[in-house]
Image (spheres, grey):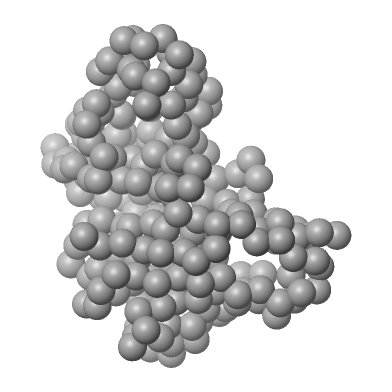
Amino acid sequence: NAGVTQTPKFQVLKTGQSMTLQCAQDMNHEYMSWYRQDPGMGLRLIHYSVGAGITDQGEVPNGYNVSRSTTEDFPLRLLSAAPSQTSVYFCASSSLPGQGVEQYFGPGTRLTVT
Amino acid sequence: AQSVSQHNHHVILSEAASLELGCNYSYGGTVNLFWYVQYPGQHLQLLLKYFSGDPLVKGIKGFEAEFIKSKFSFNLRKPSVQWSDTAEYFCAVSYTGGFKTIFGAGTRLFVKA
C-alpha cells in the first residue's frame, strides 16, 4: 500500500494564480482532510470529507475549495493564491472518526506564494 | 471553541535526560487523545493514543502518556531521550461523535548528543 500520497512536493506560485494540490489514498478510508501547518500554530483544518460527495469546512476554509468525487481522491484548490497561503499542506485519511481512530498523513506539499 | 495547549514550544535536552511535554485540552466530553511526531523531513506519524481504559498508555520508542481527566491533560513522557528523538511533537484531540481533530501548536524537541 502506498498509503496517502500528495503531489507536488514543492510549488511556487505568484499572487493571483490558481492551482490544485492532489491527494490520494489507497486504504479505502471514508474520511479525508486537509491541514495547513504554520510555525507556532500547529496544524489547522482547512476542509474535510466523510465520503464521496460530502465535504465540509474546517477552521480555515477561506480561499480554498475541495471536492470528493471518489473515495480515493481529495484535491485542494487554491482559487487565487495569496502570500498568506504560503505554508506546508498535509492531507490525511482515516476511517470515519470514532473511538481511537487515528489519521494517516501524506508527506506534505510546501507551497510558497510570492 | 475547542482548543489544545502545548506548554513548551521549544525544548532542548541532553541525551539520557527525562522528557515531559505538557498538553491540555479545552473542555470535557468523550475524548480521543493523540500524540503525533514529525521527524525532520518526514510526515506526521502516530506516537500513541488514548480513547478508553487504562489512562497510562504506552507508545512506540519508549514513549508513554497519562490521561488525567480532572486536569484535562495528556502529558507525554520518556524516561531517557536519545538524539534520534529530535522531532516536533503534536498533541491532538478529537471528540467522539465529531468530525474534527484539533491540534496543538507543537513542541520542537532538540536532543544534544
Q: Which residue is most to the left?
A: A53
Q: Position of residue B112 (x, y in %)?
A: 81, 59
Tell me: A35 left or right of B88. left
The quarter holding residue B59 reads: bottom right
Between residues A73 and B57, which one lies in front from this camera angle? B57
Q: Is residue B95 above or below residue A76?
A: below
The quarter holding residue B104 reads: bottom left
How many numbered marks are there? 0
Tell me: A21 left or right of A49. right
Q: Which residue is most to the right?
A: B113
On the question of residue A107 being in view, the answer is yes
The quarter holding residue B29 reads: bottom left
Q: Position of residue A22 (x, y in %)?
A: 38, 27
Which residue is located at x 66 percent, y 45 percent?
B40
Q: Position of residue A12 (x, y in %)?
A: 48, 15
Between residues B29 and A53, which one lies in front from this camera angle? B29
Which corner quadrant holds the C terminus of chain A?
Answer: top left
Q: Position of residue B111 (x, y in %)?
A: 75, 60
On the question of residue A99 being in view, the answer is no
Q: Is residue A11 above or below residue A4?
A: above
Which residue is located at x 31 percent, y 29 percent?
A75
Q: Is residue B7 above or below residue A68?
A: below
Which residue is located at x 43 percent, y 90 percent?
B54
Which residue is located at x 42 percent, y 35 percent?
A89
